[in-house]
Amino acid sequence: MAVNILTLPAPAKLNLFLHIIGRRSDGYHNLQTVFQFLDYADTLKFYTTDDNQFDLIDHNSQIPRDENLVWKALTALKKAYEEKGIGQLPGCSIELIKRLPQGAGLGGGSSNAATALVGLNQLWGSHLNSTELQAIGRKLGADVPVFIHGHACFAEGIGDVFTNITPPTPWYLVVKPNVSISTAALFSHPTLQRNCSPVTAENWQQQKVANVFEPVVCDLHTEVAMLRRALLEYAPTRLTGSGACLFSTFETRQAAKEAQQQVPKELCSFIAQGQNRSPLIQTLTQ
Ligand SMILES: C[C@@](CO)(OP(=O)(O)O)[C@H](O)COP(=O)(O)OP(=O)(O)OC[C@H]1O[C@@H](n2ccc(N)nc2=O)[C@H](O)[C@@H]1O
Ligand SMILES: Nc1ncnc2c1ncn2[C@@H]1O[C@H](COP(=O)(O)OP(=O)(O)O)[C@@H](O)[C@H]1O
C-alpha cells in the first residue's frame, strides 16, 4: 500500500518589477527583477511505491508526463544521484495538485520543479546542497533556482543570482485575463525594451521601475490593457513576469476583497499575501 511520506507547497511568485539590461550570446537575457513569494500554492504529495518504481499522478494539469516539469525534475535528480555513485534510490510516486494557472507569470511549473527537487533530495538522503539543486534546476528553467533559494530577493543574471531583501508583505489581488502568452515569443518580440538602466538591490524602490513586458503584452492583448486600466482605479497594478496575470497591491485583505468583487467573474482571480520567505522553505525549516 502506498504511504504518503511528505507533503510540500509549491508557491506562486510575483515579479515586483522586471527590467532587461542586455542580451546574452546564448540567446537568454540578463534581467533585474524582484521576486516575492505568495501564500498561494500548488501541492506536491510524495508517496512510497509498492514496486519501487517512479510515477507522477496528475489529475488536472493536462500536461503529458514527459513534458511535466515535476517529471523532468525527478529524472534530472535521479541522474545527478547516479553520477554521484548513490545507487538504488527508493521508489516514489508524486501527486501534483494544481491550483496555480499556467502561462500566468506566477512560475507555477518552475515552482513545481523546485519543490520536486527539494522534496526528493530530502527523501533520498539530502546528498545535494541548495547550490547543487539550483544548478540542476537552472537547466530546467531560468525561474527554477529562485524557488529553491526560497527568500524574497533582488535577482540578476538570467534571474538566478540573488541578493536577499525584505520587501513589504501587502495583500495582492491577482487576476488572470483569458489570454495565453508564450514567454519565449515575448522575449524575442521586436519592440521589447532590452536596454534598461541598471538599478540596485538597495535603490530599486526609489527608482522608476516597471515591467518591460507590460507595454508589449498590453499592445498584443487589448483585454489585458482594459483589465489593467480597470484595476488601476482601485490600486497600483502591474504585470508579473511575462504575464498574463496582473497584480494589484492593497494594505488590507478587505480592500483587496472589495476590488475583487468588481473584477468580471469570468476572469480567474485570487487574493494572496506576499511572503518574505517561500512557504516551501518555511515548511522545511520549521
Ligand atoms: C519572465 C520570467 C520572469 O521571472 O518569468 P515567467 O513569465 O515565465 O513567469 C522568467 O524569466 C522566465 O523564466 P522561465 O519561464 O523559467 O524561462 P525558461 O523556460 O528558461 O525560458 C523560456 C524562454 O524565455 C527566454 N528567456 C528566459 C529567461 C531569461 N532570463 N532570458 C530569456 O531570454 C529563453 O530564451 C526561452 O526561450
Ligand atoms: N507542472 C507544471 N505546471 C505548470 N506548467 C508546466 C508544468 N510542467 C510543464 N509546464 C509547462 O510550463 C509552461 C510554463 O508554465 P508556468 O511555470 O506556469 O509559467 P509561467 O510562470 O510563465 O506562468 C506551461 O505552458 C506548461 O506547458
Image: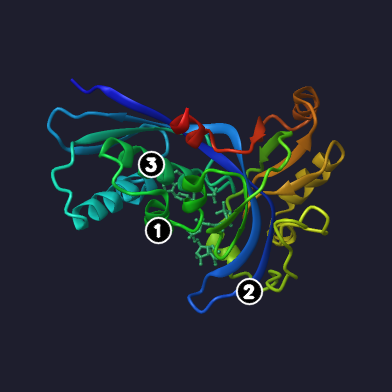
Among all residues in the image, which is located at the extreme bottom? 25
Q: Residue at x 37, y 31 (%)?
A: 59
Q: Crowdedness of circle 3 by 10 Å Cα count: few (<14), some, many (20+)?
A: many
Residue at x 78% of width, y 22% of height: 254
What secondary structure is marked by label 1? helix
**Contact flag, marks 1 and 3 (Cβ < 8 Å):** no
Q: From what the image shows, is residue 18 above or below residue 124?
A: below
The residue that mark 3 highlights is: 118
- The mark closer to the camera, 1 or 2, is 1
Instruction: State the image coordinates of residue 160 (x, y, percent, origin top left).
Output: 52, 59
User: Between marks 1 and 2, how big is the CA–CA gap?
Assistant: 22 Å
What color scheme is it? rainbow
What is the three-letter code of the residue carrying label 3?
Val
Asked whether residue 270 is in view, the answer is: no
Considering every residue shown, the one lying at the far right of the view is: 233
Q: Which mark is residue 135?
A: 1
Q: Please tell me the numbered disc located at residue 22.
A: 2
